[in-house]
Amino acid sequence: MTLDYDIIVIGGGHAGCEAASAAARLGSRTLLLTMDMAKLAAMSCNPAVGGVAKGQIVREIDALGGQMGRITDLTTIQFRMLNRSKGAAMWSPRAQCDKTRFSEEWRRTLENTWNLYIWQDAATELLFAPAPETNAAPSDNLPDETTTSFNSAPGTISSAAESDADSDPTLRNAPSAAGKLAIRGVRTRMGVEFSCRKVILTSGTFLGGVMHCGASHAEGGRAGDAASHGITESLRAIGFETGRMKTGTPARLDARTIDFEILEPQYGDENPAKFSFSPETKPIKEQLPCFLVYTSKEVHDILRTGFDRSPLFNGTICGIGPRYCPSIEDKLRTFADKDQHQLFLEPEGSSTNEYYLNGFSSSLPWEVQWKALHKIRGFEDLHIFRPGYAIEYDYFPPTQLHHSLETKLVSGLYFAGQVNGTTGYEEAAAQGLIAGINAHRAMKGESPVVLKRDEAYIGVLIDDLVTKGVDEPYRMFTSRAEYRILLRQDNADIRLTPLGYKIGLISQKQYDHFTKKNTLVESLISFAREQSVKAAEINDYLKSVDSEPLSQGRKLYDILMRNNVTFDSLQNALPKLQKFIAANEITPEAIEEAEIQIKYKGYIEREKFIAEKLRRLENIRIPENFDFHSMNALTIEARQKLSRIRPETIGQASRIPGVSPADVNVLLVKFGR
């Protein structure tokens, strides 16, 4: 007996939940295949959402019709807008969440999504069939008389550098970009076979997962959960390149044994905002504090006694770890001259005593962690729920993907999340959302949704993965985006909600709310442009905010472009402004958006101009099967990289490491006419 679905999503993490939710809501009969229904979208590391650049991604997910922002709002226990002292392009929302409620809310959402079904089991095989030789979507009308499956025995997975696929470029790139195979289905550990037309692989850290704590190691994707075997072997057998990466997590601490009185509290915003643009969620009212704690020279000396047994330093761990989020032992080695490191003590929920020690991830022996933690001020009587550990897991270099997140080797197979070499809930959820959208659209014969670098951080994320690849776990930073003044967290709805509405993830009610907000923003900007202000009525206010008084009347719009001048503070000085805002019921969100558009108008227009100039390269397409090796004018490195990554446009080619400006000019001569 074989069960049939349109789309199967493998993995119940943040990527898998967003992918399954999107595909089902768009109309595809979708199966979410997860090893543990009780841990859907589990916050297995830091119980927080957002942060620098990551907060922008979550707002984009919400603007497109994804669920992460809404569920974060429903489970927030503290909210902060980071970088408020900087320009609006750097403002980044971050929420501390109740991790148990977060997972429960995701489960409630998915179980009540029409067209979405859940099966608790582990996928062990992917089933393939010959790709149809038509111009239709490659996964449509799959022949079911021929099925090919690959399943190697479970065991330690070799790195990409050791695999035949990596040493033999012909094998690595076979089948051709056109695709000789198409996905046909999935077989599970329990022997159940599911047929489908699309598969989205979102297995997180579970593929070949091994946990390390000192000399001890055990299979698992996280504490308490088994590793997954079979999928990596299945894909390597048909030519996929694979590798190993590493992540880590700190000890979890018992709040009853912490002396909070001597710690430095870190409170949320006095007037907290929220992630979702929807009026259905509200900002949190009662927040829990986090706390700052510090290591010391004594703590460092104890930690160093375990370095010879550290799997990071003795060669046990071969996977690549995140440079920007190092373990505590990495910090001590990299910053050997520092006698102190700042750590963040964060609650894991409103009804638990479990705390997360952000900045102290470690794979040192548990007894070394125990001794060192007890030397931190406030932790003298500490009890630990569980020590920190590192995880090694399989990933697939993302240059093997199209920008739709469909693989180049197998039509109908999509990758999203940590299997692509990324880290973080937000990056994973964004990929899952795009993969879910595009898998559904491919089934309908529709073109994929591909966001450009000047349209969304999600576009930057996916373009970086596909064109540049990864040499460490990829995390989004604002510095990765060339157009971050355009990609602000406040205007994610303006950029992406019309698209979400067009493809069917934004409801009419949500879209009406969006258009109403836009109308309010435009009306307030128009009022500021038209309203004249006399010097006599504004100069006292300008002096109060350290701004030069007027010598003659000016438009309100011009006054708002000054530093320290805001709509909120101006209302007391200008009753006519206050009256206009009240009469038109202009919301705080609309006021903030109007103010940002006024103050940053020049910067915004300049970035738009630059983006439009460079977009010319994005519109010059390269034939799908073009032979780059035939172009002797290209450097050898460029020919190799272009042949391997197969960029679809000259814009994409220009961002591939190893492709020089001279190589781009050669491509322009060839394809730019």
Image: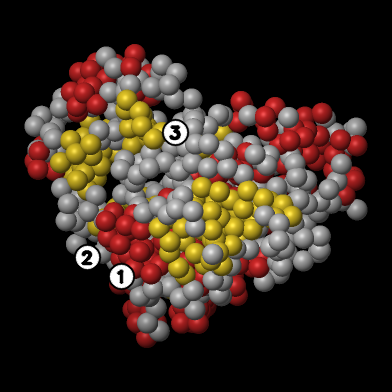
Marks 3 and 2, how far apart in space? Answer: 40 Å
Callout 1 secondary element: loop
Marks 3 and 1, how far apart in space? Answer: 39 Å
Which color scheme did the rendering employ for the protein? secondary structure
- Mark nearest the camera among 3 and 1 is 3
How many other residues sit within 10 Å of disc 3, few (<14), some (14-19) or many (≥20)? many
**Residue 325: image x %, image y %?**
40, 35
- Residue 574 can be seen in this image: no
Q: Amino acid at mark 2?
A: Lys
Q: Relative to 666, is 469 on the left or the right?
A: left
Residue at 19% of width from left, 62% of height from top?
286
Q: Amino acid at mark 1?
A: Lys
- Residue 327: quarter of image: top left
Question: Does 104 sit above or below residue 315?
Answer: below
State the residue position of label 2.
Answer: 285
- Residue 512 can be seen in this image: yes
State the residue position of label 3.
Answer: 392
Callout 3 secondary element: strand
State the residue position of label 1.
Answer: 282
Ranked by sequence position, the earlier of labels 3 and 2 is 2
Foreground residue among 477 and 567: 477
Residue at 13% of width from left, 35% of height from top?
383
**Residue at the limit of the structure toward the front, as seen here:** 1
Residue at 39% of width from left, 49% of height from top?
51
Q: Are marks 1 and 2 in contact (CB under 8 Å)?
A: yes
Callout 2 secondary element: loop
Which image quarter is the N terminus in? Answer: bottom right
